[in-house]
C-alpha cells in the first residue's frame, strides 16, 4: 500500500519556475503552498482511516480492555501489562514462530513458482499465453471466501474429491483421511490455498517486468555463449530486481497476516496448533473479549512486519531514489 | 489492496466502529406512549415463526404504536455480535442468550438486573432450576429462563433389529451393541454405529460426569480445573474407546452436520437434542421416511439401572441495560416466557419449557425421553469467564488432540485443566 501511495504522490513535485516570470518578483505564497495543498486531501484521508485507528489501537493495547470496559467505554490503563503477559505466554511465542515459518515457506514458494510461470508465459505462443493469463486472472477474480470454501470441500474429510482422487490413483488409502489431524498436513493445505491465491498477482507482475528486459541484451549474451540459466541469473534477475522486491515485500505482508484461509478452512474454530498471528489476534479480541490483549498482539504484528520488511522497503526506496 | 487478507486493518476498523459507536446517542424513544421500536434478537431455531408471530400479535394488541423487530442471529459468531451490540448505545432491547453466555454479559454490566421484577414473570417459582441458576450471578437475577434442551441417543430401530440388539442400559452395553452393529454392517465403509465428531464436547460431558468427574470446581474464591482428575479421565477414556470402535465421523469435525449425515442412512446412533428429530425427518434437509424408524433412549450410565447426567442446554431472555424501552422489553419477555407460549414451545417447538409445571404437556413418547433426561442434568461452571473457555475452544481442542492420537488422555486433560483454570481466574 505504502509503496503505491508514494509513487502516486510522486508527480506532485513542484514544477520548475517558468523563465518568463518577470525577474525580481517574489514567488506568491499560494504557489509555494500548492504542492502541500494538493497532497493535503490524501494525507487527511490517510490520517483519518489509517492514523486514527492505529493510534487508537496503540492506546487500547495499553489498557485492560475487556467486555466490561467495552460496554462502559472506559479502559483501565495498565501500561505495558498486556505486552508483558504476552511475553510470558508460551502460546504466543509459538504463534509468532509458526507465522514466521509459514511466511518464509509460502513467500519463497510463491515467488519461485510465479517466476517460473512468468518465464513460461514469455515463451508461449500467443493463444496459449492468453489461455494461461485468463486462468490466472480467473483465480484472481474469484472472491476469497468462495475460493476457500471450494478448497475446503475438495479437502473434506467425508466428501472431498482430493481423498477420492488420491485413493483412485492408488497413492494409498485416503478414504476418511483427515487433512487437519496433523498440523503439518493442515498447514500444507493452508499453504496450497494461500499460494494458489497469491500466484496470479505475482506471476502477472513479474511477466510485465520481463517485457522490460531488452531482447538485444539477451541475444548478444546468447551469441557470446551464455546458457539459459546464465542469462536468467546475470541479465533477467538484476533487471527485475525492483519487481522482485515489490512482490516479495507485499507477499511477506499478506502472508504474515493471513487470516481468511486458515480461519475458513478450519470452520471458524481453529485449534491451538493452527493459530497464526491474525487468527490468534482475532480469537483473543473478538472471541475471548480481551480487546486490550488483542490490540497488543496487533501492535506486535505491525512491529514484526516493519522489522521483517525493513530490508525490502529500504532497497525499494534506494532504487526509487537512484537516478534511473 | 486485494481484499485478500484482513488483519490489523480489520481489527482496527472494527475496534474503531465499536468505540465510535459511543458517540451517537439520542435515537432512543420515550418510555411513555409515543411510537417506539422494540428490537428483539432471537437465535435461529429457537422459536418456530408461528410462535414469534403470535407473541408479536398479542403484544401489538396492547401497544398498537410499538413496532416489534425480531432479528434472528446465528450461533456461530454470536459473541462477536453481542460484544459490539452491547458496546453501542442502541443495543437490542431483548436478547436471547445461550445459558452458558449469560454470566459473561451479566458480569460486564450488559444486562438489566431483573431481581425486583422476578415475581411479575409467570411461573417464576417453578422455573427450571438449572436455567434459573444460569440467570443468577451474585444473588441477582439477570434474565428469565426461556427454554431448555437435553440430549439423548437417537437410534435407528430397523438397524438395531437387523443386528439383533436392543437399546443398551449400561455403557458397556452401549459398546457391545455398537460392536454388533459394526459387524452387521461390515460391508459399508462409511458406517458408524455411533457417529461422534471429535469436537462434540457437549456429548462428552455426560461421560465425564457419569464417573464423578467435572470440568472445574470453585475452591474458595478461585476456580480449579478438574478434567485431569482420575474420575474425569476415566469417563473420557471410556468415551475414547467407544469413539474408536464405533465412529467414523471426522475426529476434528463438529456436530453441525450430524443430522444431515444421520439422514443419509450410514449411521445407527447419534447423541442429539430433542429438536434434531425434526431436522432428520425434514423433507428438505433430511429424510421424512425415517420417521417411524427412529427411537430414543437416554445415554446409559456405567452403573446398571441409571442414566448418565446430561448437559442441560438452553436459552434465557435478557433485557439490555442500555435499552431505552425497559418496560416494553420486560413485557415482551413476560409473554414469551409465560404459560401460554411456553405451552406452545413444548408442544409445537418440541423443546423443554422453562417451568416444571408445564413438563406434563409433553405427551409425545420421543419428546418424553428428552424431558426425562433433563431431570438428571448438569451445567457447566457458572463463572463470568466460562463463555471465554467455550470461545477459546479449550475442551474441543482437548478432545481432538486425544482422538487424533496427538496426546494422551492424561497430558491433554492436564493442559486443558490448566488453561481452564487460567481463563476462569483471570480478571476481566
Image (cartoon, coloured by chain):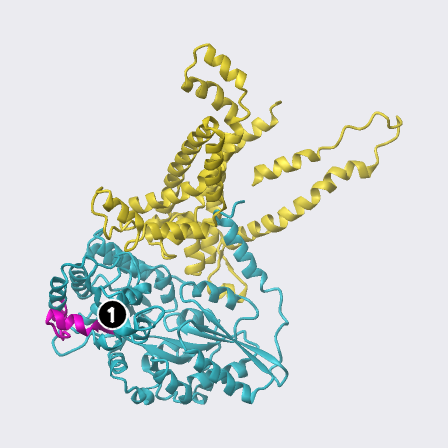
Q: Is residue B334 left or right of residue B134?
A: right
Q: Position of residue B289 (x, y in %)?
A: 27, 73
Pick the front one: B402 or B263: B263
The answer to whether residue A48 is seen in the rendering is yes
Q: Would residue B160 be counted in the magenta stretch? A: yes
Q: Position of residue B425 (x, y in %)?
A: 35, 63
Tell me the shade of chain A: yellow
Pick the front one: A94 or B155: B155
Residue under pointer 1:
B271
Image quadrant where residue B169 sits? bottom left
The answer to whether residue A308 is seen in the rendering is no
Please give the letter of the chain rendered in cyan: B
Tell me the residue at 42%/30% (across/down): A116
Question: Relative to A243, does residue B201 appear above or below in the rendering?
Answer: below
Tell me the residue at 88%/27% (across/down): A24
Question: Relative to B171, does residue B131 appear above or below in the rendering?
Answer: below
Q: Is residue A111 left or right of residue B208?
A: right
Q: Position of residue A61 (x, y in %)?
A: 49, 53
Q: Is residue A304 left or right of residue B203?
A: right
Image quadrant where residue A14 sits? top right
Tell me the residue at 44%/29% (across/down): A120
Magenta segment: B152-175
Amino acid at each position: 500500500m505504502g509503496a503505491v501511495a508514494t509513487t502516486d504522490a510522486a508527480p506532485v513535485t513542484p514544477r520548475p519556475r517558468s523563465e518568463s516570470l518577470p525577474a525580481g518578483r517574489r514567488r506568491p505564497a499560494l504557489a509555494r503552498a500548492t504542492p502541500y495543498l494538493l497532497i493535503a486531501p490524501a494525507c487527511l484521508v490517510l490520517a483519518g482511516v489509517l492514523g486514527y485507528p492505529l493510534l487508537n489501537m496503540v492506546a487500547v493495547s495499553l489498557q485492560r480492555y475487556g467486555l466490561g470496559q467495552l460496554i462502559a467505554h472506559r479502559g483501565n490503563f495498565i501500561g505495558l501489562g498486556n505486552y508483558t503477559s504476552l511475553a510470558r505466554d508460551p502460546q504466543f511465542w509459538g504463534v509468532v514462530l509458526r507465522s514466521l515459518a509459514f511466511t518464509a515457506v509460502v513467500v519463497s514458494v510463491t515467488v519461485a513458482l510465479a517466476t517460473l510461470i512468468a518465464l513460461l508465459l514469455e515463451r508461449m505462443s500467443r493463444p496459449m499465453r492468453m489461455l494461461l493469463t485468463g486462468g490466472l486472472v480467473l483465480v484472481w477474480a474469484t472472491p476469497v471466501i468462495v475460493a476457500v470454501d471450494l478448497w475446503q470441500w475438495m479437502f473434506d474429510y467425508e466428501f472431498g474429491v482430493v481423498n477420492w482422487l488420491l485413493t483412485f490413483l492408488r497413492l494409498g488409502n485416503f478414504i476418511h483421511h483427515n487433512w487437519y489431524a496433523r498440523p503439518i498436513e493442515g498447514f500444507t493445505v493452508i499453504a496450497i490455498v494461500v499460494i494458489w491465491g497469491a500466484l496470479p498477482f505475482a506471476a502477472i507482475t513479474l511477466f510485465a517486468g520481463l517485457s522490460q528486459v531488452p531482447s538485444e541484451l539477451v541475444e548478444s549474451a546468447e551469441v557470446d555463449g551464455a546458457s539459459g540459466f546464465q542469462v536468467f541469473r546475470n541479465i533477467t534477475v538484476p533487471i527485475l530486481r525492483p519487481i522482485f522486491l515489490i512482490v516479495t515485500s507485499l507477499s511477506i505482508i499478506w502472508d504474515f497476516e493471513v487470516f481468511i484461509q486458515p480461519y475458513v478452512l478450519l470452520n471458524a474454530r481453529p485449534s491451538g496448533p493452527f493459530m497464526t498471528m491474525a487468527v490468534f489476534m482475532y480469537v483473543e479480541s473478538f472471541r475471548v473479549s480481551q480487546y486490550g490483549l488483542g490490540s497488543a498482539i496487533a501492535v506486535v504484528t505491525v512491529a514484526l512486519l516493519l522489522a521483517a520488511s525493513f530490508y525490502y522497503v529500504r532497497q525499494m526506496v534506494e532504487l526509487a531514489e537512484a537516478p534511473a | 489492496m486485494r481484499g485478500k487478507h484482513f488483519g490489523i486493518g480489520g481489527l482496527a476498523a472494527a475496534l474503531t466502529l465499536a468505540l465510535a459507536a459511543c458517540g451517537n446517542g439520542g435515537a432512543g424513544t420515550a418510555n411513555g406512549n409515543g411510537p417506539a421500536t422494540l428490537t428483539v434478537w432471537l437465535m435461529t431455531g429457537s422459536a418456530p415463526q408461528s410462535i414469534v408471530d403470535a407473541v408479536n400479535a398479542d403484544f401489538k394488541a396492547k401497544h398498537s404504536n410499538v413496532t416489534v423487530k425480531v432479528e434472528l442471529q446465528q450461533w456461530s459468531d454470536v459473541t462477536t455480535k453481542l460484544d459490539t451490540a452491547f458496546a453501542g448505545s442502541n443495543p437490542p432491547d431483548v436478547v436471547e442468550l445461550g445459558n452458558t453466555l449469560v454470566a459473561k454479559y451479566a458480569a460486564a454490566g450488559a444486562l438489566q438486573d431483573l431481581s425486583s421484577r422476578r415475581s411479575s414473570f409467570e411461573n417464576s417459582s417453578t422455573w427450571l432450576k438449572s436455567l434459573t441458576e444460569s440467570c443468577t450471578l451474585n444473588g441477582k437475577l439477570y434474565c428469565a429462563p426461556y427454554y431448555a434442551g437435553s440430549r439423548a441417543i437417537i437410534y435407528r430401530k430397523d438397524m438395531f433389529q437387523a443386528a439383533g440388539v436392543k437399546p443398551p442400559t449400561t455403557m458397556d452395553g452401549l459398546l457391545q451393541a455398537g460392536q454388533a452393529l459394526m459387524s452387521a454392517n461390515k460391508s459399508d465403509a462409511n458406517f458408524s454405529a455411533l457417529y461422534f465428531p471429535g469436537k462434540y464436547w457437549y456429548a462428552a460431558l455426560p461421560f465425564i460426569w457419569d464417573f464423578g468427574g467435572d470440568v472445574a470446581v470453585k475452591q474458595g474464591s478461585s476456580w480449579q480445573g478438574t478434567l485431569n482428575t482420575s474420575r474425569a479421565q476415566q469417563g473420557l477414556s471410556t468415551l475414547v474407546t467407544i469413539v474408536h470402535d464405533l465412529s467414523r465421523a471426522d475426529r476434528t469435525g463438529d456436530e453441525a452436520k450430524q443430522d444431515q449425515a444421520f439422514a443419509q442412512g450410514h449411521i445407527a446412533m447419534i447423541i442429539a437434542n430433542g429438536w434434531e428429530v425434526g431436522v432428520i425427518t425434514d423433507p428438505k434437509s433430511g429424510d421424512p421416511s425415517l420417521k417411524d424408524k427412529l427411537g430414543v433412549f437416554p445415554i446409559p450410565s456405567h452403573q446398571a439401572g441409571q442414566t448418565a447426567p446430561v448437559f442441560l442446554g438452553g436459552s434465557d431472555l435478557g433485557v439490555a441495560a442500555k435499552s431505552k424501552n425497559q418496560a416494553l422489553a420486560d413485557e415482551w419477555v413476560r409473554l414469551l416466557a409465560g404459560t401460554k407460549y411456553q405451552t406452545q414451545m413444548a408442544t409445537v417447538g418440541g423443546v423443554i419449557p422453562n417451568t416444571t409445571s408445564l413438563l406434563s404437556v409433553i405427551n409425545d413418547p420421543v419428546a418424553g425421553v428428552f424431558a426425562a433426561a433433563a431431570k438428571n442434568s448438569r451445567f457447566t461452571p457458572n463463572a463470568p469467564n466460562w463463555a471465554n473457555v467455550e470461545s477459546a475452544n479449550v475442551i474441543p481442542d482437548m478432545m481432538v488432540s486425544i482422538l487424533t492420537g496427538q496426546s494422551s488422555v492424561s497430558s491433554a486433560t492436564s493442559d486443558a485443566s490448566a488453561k481452564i483454570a487460567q481463563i476462569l481466574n483471570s480478571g476481566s
